Image (spheres, rainbow, N blue to C red):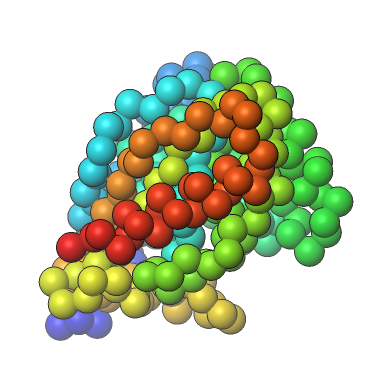
Amino acid sequence: MRALMGAWRLLRVVIHVFAGVAMLALVFPRRDALGRQWHIQHWSRGLLRCLGLRLTVVGERVVAPASFLVVNHVSWLDIACVQAVLPQARFVSKADVRHWPLIGWMVAAAGTLFIERERKRDALRVVHHCAEALRAGDTVAVFPEGTTGTGPELLPFHANLLQAAVSVDAPLQPLALRYFTAVERFAQAPAYVGEMHLLRSLWQIASASGLQAELKILPVVDTQGLERRALSDAARGMIQRALNDSA
């Protein structure tokens, strides 16, 4: 039964991905910013439905324009969970994602900024682009852990990218994301860690029973007068406490 459910969900995901490709190629270029955000949100919510995942939001859903979102990182699915609620978010993602079949093209078309984490100098380039996006009124989202973790305990935060928020005095918005089931406070199925292949991760999520996600939108942090390291420590502490307090 589990295998049958997983196969059915995967079939729905494949159809949904191709529908997204058609939307991005044919409809997206003719839409204004709000129209594009509507399509991003609609597609992200649809992906979660295809995978049988229920998303719950805790906190105020209205985020100030030109905010800098900081999110803990568990899975490739994190972006869809955030954009199902905050479709205006432009994510900074590792450059490898750009080369994923279809998905890489889709996230690039949706405005994702890519960083080569192995090259320290590339962080300066991305900080510059993030600052430009914030000045233009865009909302930028980053995973400051730099890689995925299993969920309960955060990895150290890299403060480099937070310099973009400091440079333009953009409000910092921490988000705490958790996947869970009725028997797992932190579900293992979505964890995309180590050398796991994308297809294996997709199967684990599609075949999981009762998988849910919880997105906590935490209080805004004023970046004025703070250095990036202090800002990083404050955001990490808030997100870790929110995860600890999760039921």
- List x then y, in percent, for residue 150: 43, 73
Residue 37 left/right relative to 90 = left
Instruction: Give the image quarter of residue 2.
Output: bottom left
From what the image shows, is residue 175 above or below residue 237?
Answer: above
Q: Nearer the viewer, residue 147 or 218?
A: 218
Residue 133 at least partly seen: no
Residue 190 left/right relative to 103 = left
Q: Residue at x 40, y 41 (%)?
A: 83
From what the image shows, is residue 180 above or below residue 34?
Answer: below
- List x then y, in percent, for residue 230: 60, 46
From what the image shows, is residue 43 above or below residue 180?
Answer: above
Picture quarter with the C terminus: bottom left
Q: Nearer the viewer, residue 33 or 156?
A: 156
From what the image shows, is residue 128 above or below residue 75?
Answer: above
- As drawn, which residue projects farthest toward the right? 121
Picture quarter with the N terminus: bottom left
Q: Residue at x 76, y 56 (%)?
A: 116
- List x then y, in percent, for residue 64: 43, 23
- List x then y, in percent, for residue 81: 36, 49
Residue 62 left/right relative to 155 = left
Q: Nearer the viewer, residue 58 or 238?
A: 238
